[in-house]
Amino acid sequence: MSSNMIRRVSVAAVAIPTAIVVVYTGGWALAGLLSVFAGLGAAEVFKLAERAGIRPLKELGYVGAAAIPVTVFAASADGLGLDYQYILFAAPVFVIAVMAHAVFKRSPEEKPLAAVSITVFAVIYTSGLLAFLILLRHPPVPLTAWGATWLVFLPLTVVWVCDSMAMTFGSMIGGPKFAPVVSPNKTWSGTIAGSVSGGVVAPIYFWIFLNRFPFDLSLPQLIVFGVVVSSVGQVGDLAESLFKREVGTKDSGTFFPGHGGILDRFDSLYWAIPTAALLLRIYGVI
């Protein structure tokens, strides 16, 4: 086994049990961990931007990224029960604050439009999308801690299986490239295998972990869920690859040994988690 593979397996052996414990605990512990990941992810976005000659407004970016998961949990019934309108009001206040900061900290020659845009985007991308995990763990319907935990891991498992199957079948079968300019190694065979595997693993996961809880999901709904979440996640992976290719870097960071940075590990999840939350809301689960 290569040293890189040993590092990857070691990270997974620690990360997966830790994630289960934190998600089961939920509450401020989960919100706090997501805030940390959001801040670290924002830092990687800022680093990519700096390679392109843009100076983001980092301080406000870090504050905004860290605040969203905590605020979302505070607004939940298990948190402080705050009115969700506070979050809606907070969004324009944050944008105004970033723009006002740029007025005093950036000259016209320092690309203030790009600086403001990157700062706001980084917060929405690395924190706003990730915060939908709070909605899955603390939905507006009553769930036991284990029921909510396994619900959180439904889209995570779909994405992980999709990534593995896409890589495996793409390497075995090969064929036409899916997005040759953005990611030359991705093939149509791997992409299709990944999406199909999502449609297969979602019902299996449901029957193993969620069937004993009060979730009313049919087989067609679970198949659609798996295919859509896995497909959206793969496009999310390509989107992050597009950013890295623009600035000429392979990995967004080195936070996870053998796995790359925060963005490298969360790229698919940033898109898959809110998609999963939307589908589960449509299905009447949350």
Image (cartoon, rainbow, N blue to C red):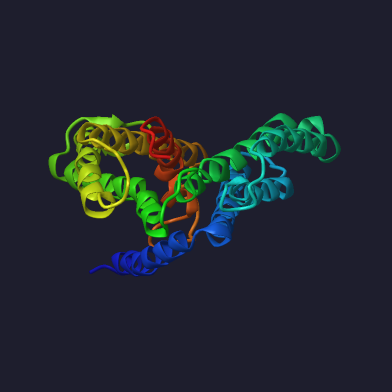
Residue 37 versus residue 46 in the image, above or below: below
Q: Residue at x 19, y 38 (%)?
A: 193
* Residue displayed at 69% across by 42% down: 56
Residue at image position (35%, 68%) is: 7
Q: Quadrant of the N terminus?
A: bottom left
Image quarter for residue 116? Answer: top right
Q: Quadrant of residue 35?
A: bottom right
Q: Is residue 106 left or right of residue 34?
A: right
Residue shown at the point (57%, 45%) measured from the top left: 127
Q: Position of residue 220 (x, y in %)?
A: 22, 31
> Is 48 in front, or is 121?
121
Relative depth, front residue between 239 and 2:
239
The image shows residue 207 at horizontal and vertical percentages of 21, 49
Relative to 92, residue 163 above or below:
below
Q: Can you tell which quarter of the image residue 19 is in?
A: bottom left
Residue furthest toward the right?
A: 104
* Number of on-image labels: 0
Residue 150, percent from left and from top: 35, 54
* Quadrant of the rendering where the C terminus is positioned: top left
Whether residue 238 can be seen here: no
Would you say 247 lies left or right of 86 here?
left
Q: Nearer the viewer, residue 96 or 43?
A: 96
Single out the residue that lies furthest toward the left: 173
In the picture, measured across the screen, residue 110 lies left or right of residue 178, that is: right
